[in-house]
Amino acid sequence: MNPLSYFAPVVAFRFMREGLTQTFLIVLGVALGGGVIIFMSALLAGLQANIIRRTLNFQAPIQIQAPDQLARPLREGDSDAVANQVQPRSQQLRSVDQWQKIRADVARIPGVTSVTPVVTGPGFAQRGEATKAVSIIGIETESYFKVVALPDKIIGGRYDMGPIDAIVGTELARDLGIGIEDKFALKAANGAASTLSVVGIFDFGNKGVNERNVYVTLRTAQNLLDLAGGATSLDVKVHDPFAAETIAQTVRQGSDLHVDSWISTNAQFFSAMAAQILANTLIRIFVGITVALGIASVLVVSVVQKSKEIGILRAMGTTRPQVLRIFLIQGAFMGLVGALFGSLLAWIFLQLWRGVATNPDGTPLFVVVIEPSLFAIACVGATLVGILAAAVPARRAARLDPVVAIRG
Amino acid sequence: MADASPGVADTLRLTGVRKSYATGTPVEIEVLHGVDLTLRHGEFAALIGPSGSGKTTLLNVIGLLDRPTAGRVFIAGQDAGTLDEMETTHLRGRTIGFVFQYHYLLPAFTALENVMMPVLAARGRTDREMRESAAALLDRVGLTQWRDNKASAISGGQQQRVAIARALAMNPALVLADEPSGNLDTESADAVFDLMRDVNERSGTTFLIVTHDPRLAQRCDRIVELVDGRIVSDRANTKVVRRG
């Protein structure tokens, strides 16, 4: 068989041109199906990326903390326990033991891009009569900004801080009635207090974070929380956010440290995302099956309509593989052209979506990035679906007995 | 037993060909009961017989569209029984041309493209020589001016002439025609018949024509009569009627 033979393509395209209405309708059907799949995939990918980005905006992918303090049963010598009911121990604010060494060790793990020490504890922000419960977050600015993109969220002032400076959220600034260069008192739960100057105001797009977090330098937080030279946690940034749990497990190995990845702390979000992916996959599969059945039904009808012509082609020396290819080419063409038009439709839908799905201030609800690879995958996929859908009618055509076909 | 191998000049040789349907079932029916037939190069023969006598079945067996239940079929010296499906298809494409009662042209193609179709199927491409050869065949059947018309846009007689040109496209040794003028008026039928006769005389192509029309049969060199799946008469026609 001549692989460069253009007999099958020539006959296939003439058959399709002959049944132009049929061809047009099925290509339209494939275009709509393909368009929906591409549109939904782009939307879902955009939504996921947006949620992940927003979550990781103010949360490190991995957080390492000191091991939990455990209560020990009271014993006398080597004898049995005196008290058999052991209450869980309340957890004190304490530093990760030898955090500098752990920081250096973790930084060497493949996939880790940066590690930063953080001192976190409860406190109160006070100005005049107003008092708000806050989280004091002491950071080493240079390394912390590599983990959490705080500078990008500053909407007023600056992000570099001195020992008597603080960065607060928009909600807290409003509650306390403070602005840039204004002073307020930050008190720790143990009574230690410091008067700080607001140098920057951030907006993470999350009300809780905006009214709770107060960023100060590591040293300031250590002094306030009575953790001189300590760090309550090490925040770790990784190259691939989805590898966070695997890397967290690596850190956990051989240590009693308390290591959480953003995947384990956001389990609910991940199960919702998994459900969303499953629903989307099911929709894509069913749309794909519908498209395949559409192509198959058109070609089945075509085989019946053209059985006499196929019979005569076979009688004049056309081989079964050639007849098979005539119909496979039609399926592939319908799939490919349908997907190309579907790509165009999806692109139009996505532009419309960008125009419609906006926040009240006109900014997009979430950014939908149109990946060219999505269109390429859709075109290749639709072509394969077309070929698969054509397989049954093509086999039927190839197996037609010329005598029966001609006699009709 | 007679020598089963064909003579050098034999285009077709059938020996003891039997054809049954529903083989192995209680309703098995034998349509051909041991047919022996030889067609020599350049013969112009008619196959006649009443309806249901097995003419079309015999034609299908000769045309390698159907396999005999028993017996052997030699086409241009080649024993068709030894070939697989693909080889049979190739042998059929190379050596046999078909003209049916209905033209079965591909309506999406022009007259010229229809004539080129067997060559395109065999070689997978066309070139100027093949195009010129197809055009010459159309010229021979008197359809030069219709060559670029869609097959569906010409008359029944013209379509049948295109079908004859298509049957000749591969320069076959044997043309099998099953009631080639059955759908045509008398004038068109005569024209088609004349055309086949002309091709036979000029190119030496062997023709076997199934016909119900005794008038047309009388214009063939040899008349083979099939009744109930048996050849009951096979005679040279010494009084060939020439038209015009």
Image (tube, coloured by chain):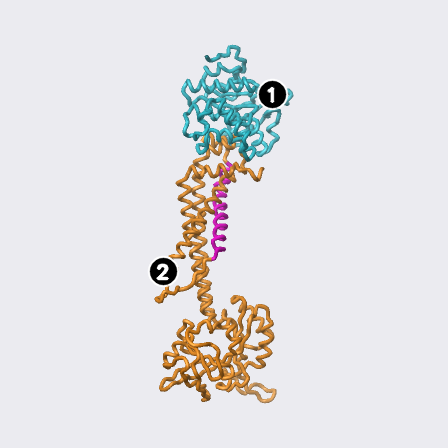
Chain colours: A orange, B cyan
Residue placed most toward the observer, A189 or A282: A189
Classify A365 as above or below B39.
Answer: below
Give the labeled residue for mark 2.
A356
Task: Find residue B59 and name its label.
Answer: none
Magenta stretch, residue numbers: A371-399
Give the total number of marks visible in the rendering.
Answer: 2
The image position of residue A119, as x and y in percent, is 50, 81
Classify B197 as above or below A358.
Answer: above
**Residue shown at 51% from the left, 27% from the top:** B134
What is the spatial separation of the Cα atoms under label 1 and label 2, in whole angstroms?
Answer: 81 Å
Left or right position of B174 against A175? right
**Residue shown at 48% from the left, 78% from the top:** A160
- Check if mark 1 and mark 2 are on a common chain: no
Mark 1: amino acid: Asp
- Badge 1 local density, few (<14 within 10 Å), some, or many (20+)? many
**Residue shown at 46% from the left, 13% from the top:** B243
Where the N terminus of chain A falls, by quadrant? top right
Indicate the quadrant where residue B61 lies. Answer: top right
Q: Give SS at disc 2.
A: helix
Classify A332 as above or below B18.
Answer: below
Give the labeled residue for mark 1.
B10
Chain containing the residue with disc 1: B
Classify B145 as above or below A290.
Answer: above
